[in-house]
Image (cartoon, rainbow, N blue to C red):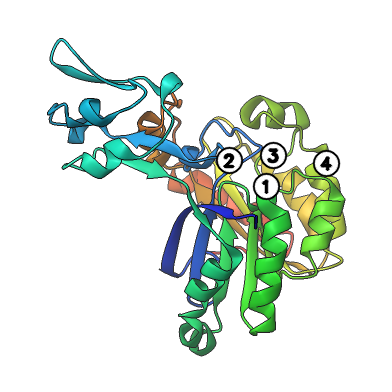
Amino acid sequence: MKQKLLVNQIQNFSLHDGPGIRTTVFLQGCNLRCKWCHNPETWKKKSILSYTENKCIGCGQCMEVCPSGAQQIQNGQHIYERTICTVCGKCVEICCTEALEIVGNDYSVEELSELLLRDRRLYEISEGGVTFSGGEPMMQAEILYDLCSRLQEEHISVAFETALAFPWKVIHRMTECVDLFLVDFKIFDNEKHKEYTGTENTLIKENLKKLVNYRPIMIRIPIIKGINDEIENAVVTADFLAALGKNIKSVELLPYHDFGVEKAKHVGVNQQMFEAPDEKQLEQLKEVYRSRKLNVVE
């Protein structure tokens, strides 16, 4: 039986995930747990059920078709018991308000390849391509290797958005079929990185040092007020990146947004609310990177 990719969503006409017009494929599964994550519904490497409470009208039809008893009506209110849900999808099929949705769908390499190649003309005229994001696409690297290789055979540019928190041998193999890496770099300090992402960053830094010898890299740094918006963090990060050389093509500072907070509720995750830096602080941080001759995305 052929393995399949578990896809969260496919976003066409993407303009912010690499050069040109791209199709961005968001994959299920992530080995980090960033407290500010804007895609918490992608954490688990399996299909899950998303429940949007304010769409529910309490009709009870989902309860009638649910074989596991996960959908319940108690005191006139809909209750969803995630712990006993089998994600069979019967409730999704019958829900007339789309309050219930399955997150994470299977695609074979052949199915996804055919789908992505439909926009090849757009990729050609815009010098775009396909970007794999997530979640963390390295979680499905073995199957993605085959898909990315097929796309390259069709002369489609392939980009990979990753935090690099994987053994080097996994990343090294992907350099054979990926043209550009978009690297999410969070916090320079190792202990603080572990506190806010659940993972140390020593391996990430070592992988980044190696990766610059293979492929061009665009760095993306989320900026969260009170977490990593200090000038000191920017200085050590900028110095580190500048020392890596010319394959660091750009640095993009991304102000925090709270899109993930509501999405987290839909999949049973309680996410902390953070704040974005003000424009003055963000500009000061950008200047630190510019002063190191790094190309800062505006």
Local crowd at mark 2 within 10 Å, few (<14), some, or many (≥20)?
many
Q: Which residue is mark 3?
A: 233
Residue 19 appears anywhere in the view: no
Whether residues under marks 1 and 3 lie with C-beta atoms below 8 angstroms apart, the answer is no
Local crowd at mark 1 within 10 Å, few (<14), some, or many (≥20)?
some
Q: Which mark is residue 139?
A: 1
Label 3 SS: helix
Does residue 265 sit above or below 77 in this rendering? below
Rendering coords of residue 147 (x, y %): 65, 68
Residue positioned 13% across, 15% down in the render: 76
Q: How many badges with numbers are in the image?
A: 4
Q: Which residue is mark 2?
A: 45
- Left or right: where 61 falls relative to 84: left
Whether residues under marks 4 and 1 lie with C-beta atoms below 8 angstroms apart, the answer is no
Q: Which residue is mark 4?
A: 203
Tell me which label, 3 or 4, sits earlier in the chain.
4
Q: CA distance from mark 4 to mark 1?
A: 16 Å
